[in-house]
Amino acid sequence: MTRLYLGYSDEEMKTSPYARFFNPKMAELPRHVIDALSKGTVAHELLPPFARVGELQRGGYALVENGYTIAPDGSARIACLTEMPGVTPQMWEWWFAWHGSEAQRYKLWHPLAHVDVGWADGRADLAYIGRTSNIVEYIGSRRMNVAVRFVPPASIGFDEQQLRARGEVAICGRGIVRDLRMESGWLVHHIRPVPGGSEMRSRFWLGGGNVNPIGMEGALGKFIGRTAAKLQAFSSTQAAELMIHDAQEMNHLAAILPVLHAAFHSKN
């Protein structure tokens, strides 16, 4: 069995081509994230349900770009904004295709929480849509065996022609709890260019009505999903931990993504 561990080993620090980018000293959380955490949960009406995900393509900003809530069905809704000077949306699209085949790459993203990654199909080519990424990571103090099945933006309500015309990228995925073989929610990272760089608007919809057994989409699947969601209800503490995790990893990687992209994007 492969031993899983946080960080780089001494040998990896000496030999890995990525070691010079590995920095376990994380930057402080942005002020807007700290302010949102200090407010606690917000009214669920302020964070739209997954069915309205396409609204992210509207110009401007939502009423809440940083915050979290627990909806009436017990699901968590989380929003987090990451400002990224010097970063383009296309760099993030490259990153999601590139990092998933090696744990050493994945650990660069969040050195204090990411443990392991691998594509379910075993391939190492540069692609992510239509594939499932198996992940081991910490959210808060909980080590989790999860997965993300990446889907085309159009399949959940985005206008892909408009995304391309605006130079935007939408990373869209179905979250999976591998130990339970349950689809647990949805995630979207909408990245759009702004003067001097880009910004990422991350959204998560987890638990509650978002839960479904893998491969069981009908009425029985929805019933089992609702039952499972009630047995393991998502808490506001867990929602806050995920918001913190997202803010940490996105801000940390954004600081090194331009140099990572320059160093490795042409080598694959």
Image (cartoon, rainbow, N blue to C red):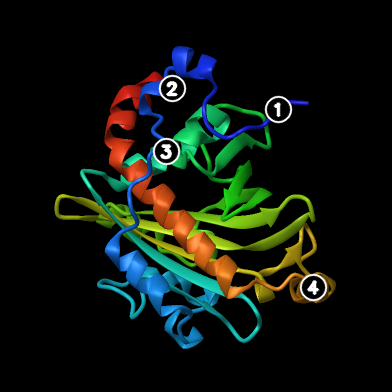
Q: CA distance from mark 2 to mark 3?
A: 12 Å
Nearest-to-viewer mark from 2 and 3: 3
Question: Where residue 55 sits: x, y (%)?
Answer: 40, 74
**Would you name the residue on which mark 1 appears?**
3
Q: Which residue is mark 4?
A: 231
Which comes sooner in the sequence, label 2 or label 3? 3
Q: Camera-side residue: 44 or 235?
A: 235
Q: Earlier in the sequence, mark 3 or mark 1?
A: 1
Within 10 angstroms of label 3, few (less than 14), some, or many (20 or more) residues?
Answer: many
The reply to whether the C-beta atoms of the residues labelled 2 and 4 are less than 8 Å apart is no
Mark 2: which secondary structure? Answer: loop
* Mark nearer the viewer, 2 or 1: 1
Q: In the drawing, what numbered circle is on residue 121?
A: none
Q: Position of residue 203 (x, y in %)?
A: 46, 65
Tell me the element at label 4: helix
Which labelled disc corresponds to residue 268? 2
Which comes before the other along the chain, label 2 or label 1? Answer: 1
Residue for badge 3 = 95
**C-alpha distance separating marks 3 and 4:** 35 Å
Is 183 left, or right, of 171 in this rendering? Answer: right
Can residue 133 be seen by looking at this rendering? no
* Amino acid type of the residue tagged 4 in the rendering: Leu
Give the image quarter of residue 33.
bottom left
Number of residues whose C-alpha sits closer than 10 Å to that of mark 1, classed few (under 14), some (14–19) or many (20 or more) = few
Residue 152 % position (x, y): 52, 53
Q: Is residue 199 left or right of residue 204?
A: left
Count neighbours of disc 4 (C-alpha within 10 A) and say few if under 14, some if 14 to 19, many if 20 or more. few
Task: Identify the image quadrant of residue 265.
Answer: top left
Q: Nearer the viewer, mark 4 or mark 1?
A: 1
